[in-house]
Image (spheres, rainbow, N blue to C red):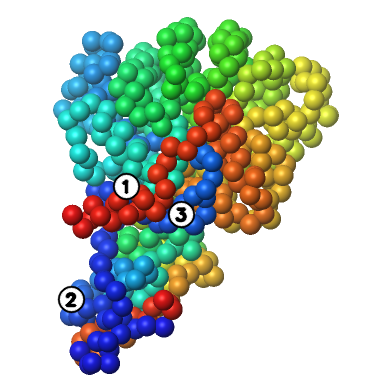
Amino acid sequence: MPEVNIGNASSFSDPGRKVFEVSGQEVGVFLLGGEFYAWENRCPHLDGPACQGRLLPLATEAVNDDHTSRGREFSKEHMNVVCPWHGMEFDIRTGRHPTNQAIRLRKVAVRVEHGEIYVTLRGV
Amino acid sequence: MPDEIKSSLVGDIRELQEITAATDTRDYLFAAARQAERQYDDYEVIIDVDAHTQEGRFWPEILEFMENDVLKHTALNQLAGGIRTPLINMQPGMSFQAMSGRVPHQSGPAEKVTNPEKPGAAFVEIARRSIDFMGVDYQVVFPTSMLHLGMNPMEDIEIYLARAYSRWMTELVLPQEPRLAGLIYLPFNNVDECERMVREFGGHPQVVGYTICAVRHKPVHHNQYMRLYSMIEESGKPLVFHAGPHWDDPSFSQLNRFISMHALSFVHYNLIHMTNWIINALPERFPKLKTVWVESGVAWVPFLMQRLDHEVLLRQSEAPGLKRMPSEYMQDMFYSSQPLERYDLKLLEATFDKMKASTQLLFSSDWPHWDFDPPSSITSLPFLDDQAKRNILGLNAAKLFNLPIKRTRPRAADAMAARAADRVS
């Protein structure tokens, strides 16, 4: 499985994302909280370009101790990427759908060395 | 960069941009073209029976065909004031469709076209991009903004907008693209005007049927409509019930989120109209009139079959016109596929069996709406055989709408290669 240099780590904002096509494979590389994550740009729903959508905080239902609701609030900890085809959301750190954790993006190995980012492609 | 890593570089690296409302439809749907190449590139015909190419962008063109001076004046004033689709009386809640920007194509199209000044040309170019990249030969287009027009308290607006839209479609759009087909909107709040629409527009070669937007409070079995149904039956073209969202029904006002209203509303209106259609035995009165039930998915079909079969056996005196069970009439009708409820495939398979999907189901994309389905929503179903997939994706619709079984779409590989070359140049 070839490892590919996709550019300089300093070119990313945090939170930030870039999506690359390399040898016919599409990979989304994300920087969040100082850590890099990479996922295949393919939504498990219907193969949409999941990594090319908006980055938004996880929406949560804010429930008080007495079970009353304050409505919805954005999470301060969790950031999602939203597939632009149908709106399916995935946690940037885990790649998993917030409601059904079995639905998830495919992980791509990513590492940083000497300020350069390397992702590992599937066999070509 | 260390030498050992440098040597591992593979091919060219291309950065892909975030998708927005301004993204070219071909880039938006590039993944659909890949699916077309892998899954159905050799199919004889693919027909999408319900798509929209948001015509809000083209409302000024439509208003040029407005035949009422006062309404045209009002519309142009509203347009100048920033209202995107004047006269529609759109509910504020409908602005939640795009999920606060999560699904940009719902808010578009804002992409560039080659000839923005030529009337009808932009609509056609954007529609062509979508059908080329979804791998579709023929597409039936439908006016999104008019889905709720039946609830407009100003009856004359429904009539005049129906006429303006139909003239725009038949005089300007369809002649520019033989791969597009249209349905004639029936202003169902005024039956005389419905009949006039059938007489004036029904003969256009690219008009393949008539549509009743289901979001309305008009009982479809009322005697006033019988002559209209006779005319449509005689035309040989189907009658299409197109469901839609609506938040103003008293029951729906209890629903506090768009998702709740959307999940129930589409099905709700088709449930009501189908129930009236069956219980009043309209299939017996119009045995050759073909009906299509659009944009409610399919899960509601077996529910209503079971429910009506159960009740008709017990209360036959209230449905005396029926000579068969409700489910048998429903099995003769046609249904569009989107939004296909695919989460539980066993349930979906049972639904397909019950509704005789291999002959009665018609693929629809609903592009560019947030819950659109590409053709792979059908080809990826593990329980369908190859012939059933071909039927649902095109052969059923070709027969129903009298469209040719003829490939008009480019090869998916060619479409993708042309787009890649565009990007380079």
Q: Chain of mark 3?
A: B
Q: Residue A11: give its label.
A: 2
Binning the other alpha carbons within 10 Å of mark 1 as few (below 14), some (14 to 19) or many (20 upward) gives many
Question: Can marks 2 and 3 be said to lie on one chain?
Answer: no
Name the residue at 56% across, 51% down.
Answer: B379
Q: Residue B37: give its label.
A: 3
Name the residue at 23% across, 52% down.
Answer: B422
| A77 w.r.t. B142: above or below | below
Pinpoint residue B139: horizontal percent, then vertical percent: 44, 34
Which residue is nearer to you in this view: A46 or A35? A46
Tell me the amino acid under the disc marked 2. Ser
Pinpoint residue B382: horizontal percent, then vertical percent: 63, 57
Which residue is nearer to you in this view: B177 or B353? B177
Q: Is residue B23 visible?
A: yes
Pinpoint residue B386: horizontal percent, then vertical percent: 63, 49
Q: Chain of mark 1?
A: B
Residue A26 falls left or right of residue B378: left
Q: Residue B33: give its label.
A: none
Tell me the amino acid under the disc marked 3. Glu
Name the residue at 43% across, 78% down.
Answer: A123
Question: Can marks 2 and 1 be said to lie on one chain?
Answer: no
Tell me the amino acid under the disc marked 1. Thr
Q: Quadrant of the N terminus of chain B?
A: bottom left
Q: Is residue B104 visible?
A: no
Are dots 2 and 1 in contact, CB under 8 Å?
no
Spatial distance from mark 3 to mark 1, Cα to Cα? 17 Å
SS label for mark 1 = helix
Disc 2 versus disc 3: nearer the observer: 3
Q: Earlier in the sequence, mark 3 or mark 1?
A: 1
Residue where numbered disc 1 is placed: B25
Spatial distance from mark 2 to mark 1, Cα to Cα? 28 Å
